[in-house]
Image: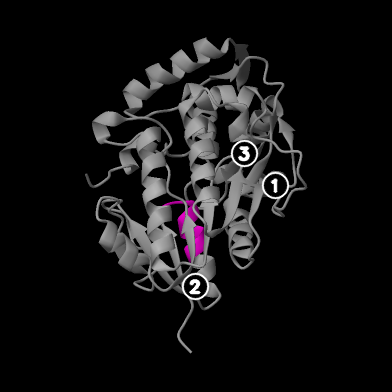
Amino acid sequence: MAEELHVVTGAFGYTGRWIAHQLLDEGKRVRTLTNAVGRDDPFGGRVEVHPLDFQDHEALVESLRGADVLYNTYWVRYNHHSKQFGHEIATENCRLIFEAAKEAGVRRIVHFSVAHPEQAPEWSYFHGKVITEKLLRDCGISYAIVRPTVLFGGGRNVLVNNIAWMLRYIPVFGLFGWGNYLIQPVHVGDVARIAIELGARDDDITRDATGPETYLYKDFIKLIGRSMRVRRLILPMPAIMAWMAGRVMGLFLKDMVITRAEIRGLMQGLVASDEEPLGEISFSEWVAEKGSELGKHYYNDLEEREYRT
């Protein structure tokens, strides 16, 4: 009997990499569709690599043909039209891959969204997520929608690592407002496990992927600092001022440090959930173990996002 084929978009990235590793450990045949340029191959050639070209419908269909499950981790964090990616473009590209999956006979799609997208419809990031979820629900294929909160763990902790980098090298850390809003981090390994478990099912389902611990944001920052054994002045400030400071920092780093949508979503508590947590790995235990390693180098998110046009 042939090995069961699973397709992961972006398996050389962050979440997709963990999904692919876990599928390989389960003895599954794994293929990735990727448009990333210059990424390393962490699988030693065990993952089949196909280009992710949304404009070549026939090639997209053939790349998906025979797959049992498609894990769609594809999205973009922010609008950057000079590099030809943005939320409207991402929404349309998701529609194209959903249609190709249906034509190719894929049994099920596991799609990655974001927690509470319907609560911030005026922001293009969340609006695009809402539209994309509806496109999947309407396309007539079995689906699971996974809505993670804030990811940690793995080799590429952009948020947690870069917070730690600021704490390590900058004497003052600015909070957005007073920091009295909730954050519920979830380990990327838990998210991968949840996605694979949902991929094995047949029912249509939308589920938050959250960790077992919830913090006030200000306490979350303090916990990271304690784990690193650094003491910093943590200063509440107006959100617009903190965003502007991030913009200035981004000019020097040549990166998008934080977006206004991310700040708003954080301050409105959209990165926590009322659902029963499916994640098992504790952030407090993880950060206590990893704290001394965090933040030694800044992870430049924009530098990694080089796409074929």
Categorize mark 2 by other alpha carbons within 10 Å: few (<14), some (14-19), many (20+): some
Question: Could you tell which of marks 3 and 1 lies nearer the N-terminus?
Answer: 3
Q: Quadrant of the C terminus?
A: top left
Q: Dot 1, crowdedness within 10 Å: few (<14), some or many (≥20)?
A: many
Q: In percent of the image, x 45 and y 20: which residue is there? A: 246
Q: Is residue 16 magenta?
A: yes
Instruction: Find the magenta span and give its range.
Output: 13-20
Residue at the image point whose x is 58% and y is 64% from the top: 199
Residue 174 placement: quadrant: top right
Q: Amino acid at mark 2?
A: Leu
Q: Amino acid at mark 1?
A: Gly
Foreground: 132 or 176?
132
Write down the quadrant of residue 103 in the picture: bottom left
Residue 16 showing in the rendered view? yes
Which residue does the numbered mark 2 point to in the structure image?
24
Task: Residue 251: give x, y in percent of width and height.
Answer: 33, 21
Question: Whole-percent x and y of residue 221?
Answer: 64, 29
- Mark earlier in primary sequence (2, 1): 2
Q: Which residue is mark 3?
A: 115
Q: Which comes before the other along the chain, label 3 or label 2?
A: 2
Decide if residue 84 is on the left or right side of residue 46.
Answer: left
> Mostly what secondary structure, the magenta segment?
helix
Circle 3 Cα neighbour tier, 10 Å, few/some/many (<14 / 14–19 / ≥20): many
From what the image shows, is residue 74 above or below residue 23?
Answer: above
Q: Would you say 46 lies left or right of 183 here?
A: left
The residue singled out by tag 1 in the image is 211
